[in-house]
């Protein structure tokens, strides 16, 4: 229960990668964190790439970054949808600027691009958006997890154990 008293937002939209949403969500709960599923505001329930549903607790317009210790963004097709909503992008940017842990895996780095928080950062992501993160000013490295300050990134579902360990470690250090 090392994360007792921590509040974590997990972003959701249609087309999320199943494991990249559920694995961190359940792992953070297992550590005692309060996890809130935050959607773009278009639905109360979103479907994964494989049809698995997640019910949102709040929409992005109902949350404030100051109320959370971390924001986690799963990959899949969802990040391309999430980045279209100014309230989602603002939430991620403000969390980052406030020094909150921001975790992004796979295609989720595209939300970081839209939030304009990658300049002079070192990150990893799914290889198909490597050019996008580099064009946003980040240095790309091909590693299972990269932590640059409060920004934690990973590439693909097989990196989830390292991704979650790094998020947990960062949140414990905040205490």
Image: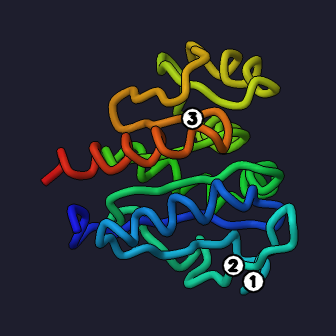
Count numbered badges in the picture: 3
Q: Calculate the distance from the C-alpha at mark 3 to the C-alpha at mark 2.
A: 22 Å
Q: Residues within 10 Å of mark 3 (few under 14, many from 20)?
A: many
Q: Which residue is mark 3?
A: 154
Instruction: Give the residue displayed 67% in from the left and 84% down from the top.
Output: 55
Label 3 residue SS? strand
Instruction: Give the residue displayed 43% in from the left and 69% down from the top.
Output: 64
Q: Is 110 left, or right, of 174 in this rendering?
A: right
Q: What kind of colouring is applied to the model shown? A: rainbow
Q: Calculate the distance from the C-alpha at mark 1 to the C-alpha at mark 2.
A: 6 Å
Q: In this picture, is 163 found above or below 89?
A: above
Q: Is residue 114 shown to the viewer in this render?
A: no
Q: In this picture, is 142 found above or below 153?
A: above
Examine the image and state in which quarter residue 34 appears: bottom left
Instruction: Give the residue displayed 67% in from the left and 24% down from the top.
Output: 133
Mark toward the viewer: 1 or 3: 3
Q: Which residue is mark 2?
A: 54
Horizontal and vertical percent for residue 40? Answer: 70, 69
Q: Earlier in the sequence, mark 1 or mark 2?
A: 1
Q: Earlier in the sequence, mark 3 or mark 2?
A: 2
Q: Which residue is mark 1?
A: 45
Q: Residues within 10 Å of mark 1 (few under 14, many from 20)?
A: some
Horizontal and vertical percent for residue 6? Answer: 27, 67
Q: Quadrant of the N terminus?
A: bottom left
Horizontal and vertical percent for residue 42? Answer: 78, 77
Q: In this picture, is 112 found above or below 23?
A: above
């Amino acid at each position: 229960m090392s994360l007792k008293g921590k509040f974590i937002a997990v972003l959701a939209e249609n087309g999320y990668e199943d494991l990249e949403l559920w694995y961190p969500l359940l792992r953070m709960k297992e550590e005692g964190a309060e996890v809130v599923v935050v959607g773009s505001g278009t639905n109360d329930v979103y479907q994964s790439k494989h049809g698995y549903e997640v019910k949102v607790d709040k929409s992005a317009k109902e949350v404030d970054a100051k109320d959370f210790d971390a924001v986690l963004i799963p990959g899949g097709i969802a990040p391309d949808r999430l980045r279209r909503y100014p309230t989602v992008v603002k939430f991620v940017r403000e969390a980052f600027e406030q020094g909150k842990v921001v975790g992004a895996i796979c295609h989720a780095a595209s939300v970081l691009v839209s939030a304009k928080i990658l300049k002079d950062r070192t990150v990893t992501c799914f290889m198909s958006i490597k050019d996008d993160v580099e064009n946003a000013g980040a240095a790309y490295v091909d590693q299972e997890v990269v932590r640059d300050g409060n920004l934690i990134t990973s590439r693909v579902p097989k990196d989830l154990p390292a991704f979650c360990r790094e998020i947990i470690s960062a949140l414990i250090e905040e205490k």
